[in-house]
């Protein structure tokens, strides 16, 4: 059989402004040289000023997209992003269990940097109960980790304890991203399934071009796993990719600009 190109899918929301969501994921997949596909579960009317409007895709149409891809492609890794509400989360979990899309990277997107909610509050419980148990990798930022565990995280020890709690909730591997802390260094804490722990530390880059960084990071991990890289290597590559993307800004729009996907 022909050796097929690594194929991946993002299960997420559209950012019409092209900086985050499905668009950021597809740009990242292209940059990392894997074939990217998409299952749209929500749409946003969005630009660099923020999110003006959003709506969730009907469940039957989310299912149709899963079925279209599963009946044709050989998908090796998948990621989730914005999941909008509890009904979407339940549909994604149900469908993911029926298909064979490989490891699942869950980026538990909750609020856009501009403050607009991308997940209804009632869906947090569904994410904890149904999505975390099927997550191969969970990539919350600090505020998302706090919501998931229901506690404030202020110290490094609390970050490490939070990762362990998230593992207990079912996520096999956890990366808590420290970019939202006030420290001079942006440190992410990684806890792998076999108990391996490490910190990813990089100098903080002062820039307004951070829109879509979380999506880009998790999309890069997805791409590297599809190429057969170890999870540890995929995480390190994603950190380097995101640092390069942030440090070489591109200029579009008049607000909070996107990261650079071809840095
Ligand atoms: N819009 C969509 C559709 C997203 O998936 C995300 C992802 O996190 C965002 C907006 C938020 O982007 P940011 O918080 O980086 O501005």
Image: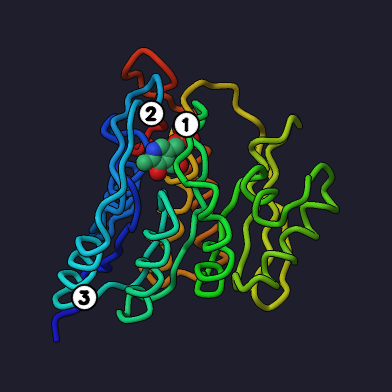
Residue 116, numbered label: 1
127 is higher (above) or lower (below) than 22: below
Question: Disc 1, ligand 1: is the CB inside 8 Å?
Answer: yes
Label 3 secondary element: helix
Going from the N terminus, do you reach mark 2 or mark 1 first?
A: 2
Label 1 secondary element: loop
154 is higher (above) or lower (below) than 246: below
Horizontal side of 192 relative to 227 (left or right) equals right
Horizontal side of 100 relative to 147 (left or right) equals left
Label 2 secondary element: strand
In the orientation shown, which residue stands out farthest toward the bottom? 1
Going from the N terminus, do you reach mark 1 or mark 3 first?
A: 3
247 is higher (above) or lower (below) than 77: above
Question: Disc 2, ligand 1: is the CB inside 8 Å?
Answer: yes
Could you tell me which residue is drawn at 36 percent across and 74 percent down?
96
Residue 245 seen in render: no
Q: Check contact, mark 2 vs mark 1: CB within 8 A.
A: yes
């Amino acid at each position: 059989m022909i050796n097929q190109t690594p194929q991946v899918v993002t299960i997420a929301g559209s950012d019409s402004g092209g900086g985050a969501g499905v668009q950021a994921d597809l740009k990242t997949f292209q940059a990392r040289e894997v074939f990217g596909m998409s299952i749209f579960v929500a749409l946003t009317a969005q630009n660099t000023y923020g999110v003006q409007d959003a709506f969730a895709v009907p469940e039957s149409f989310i299912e149709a997209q899963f079925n279209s891809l599963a009946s044709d492609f050989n998908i090796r890794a998948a990621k989730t992003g914005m999941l909008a509400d509890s009904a979407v989360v339940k549909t994604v979990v149900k469908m993911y269990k029926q298909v064979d899309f490989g490891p699942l990277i869950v980026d538990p997107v909750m609020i856009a940097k501009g403050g607009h909610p991308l997940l209804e509050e009632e869906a947090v419980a569904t994410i904890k109960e149904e999505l975390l148990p099927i997550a191969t990798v969970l990539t919350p930022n600090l505020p998302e980790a706090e919501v998931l565990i229901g506690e404030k995280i202020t110290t490094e020890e609390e970050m490490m304890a939070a990762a362990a709690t998230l593992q207990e909730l079912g996520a096999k591997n956890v990366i808590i991203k420290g970019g939202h802390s006030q420290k001079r260094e942006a440190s992410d804490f990684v806890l792998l399934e076999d108990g391996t722990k490490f910190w990813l530390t990089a100098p903080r880059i002062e820039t307004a071009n951070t829109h879509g960084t979380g999506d880009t990071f998790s999309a890069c991990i997805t791409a590297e796993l599809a190429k057969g890289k170890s999870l540890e290597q995929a995480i390190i590559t994603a950190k380097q990719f995101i640092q390069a993307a942030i440090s070489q800004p591109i200029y579009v729009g008049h607000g909070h600009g996107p990261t650079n996907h071809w840095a």
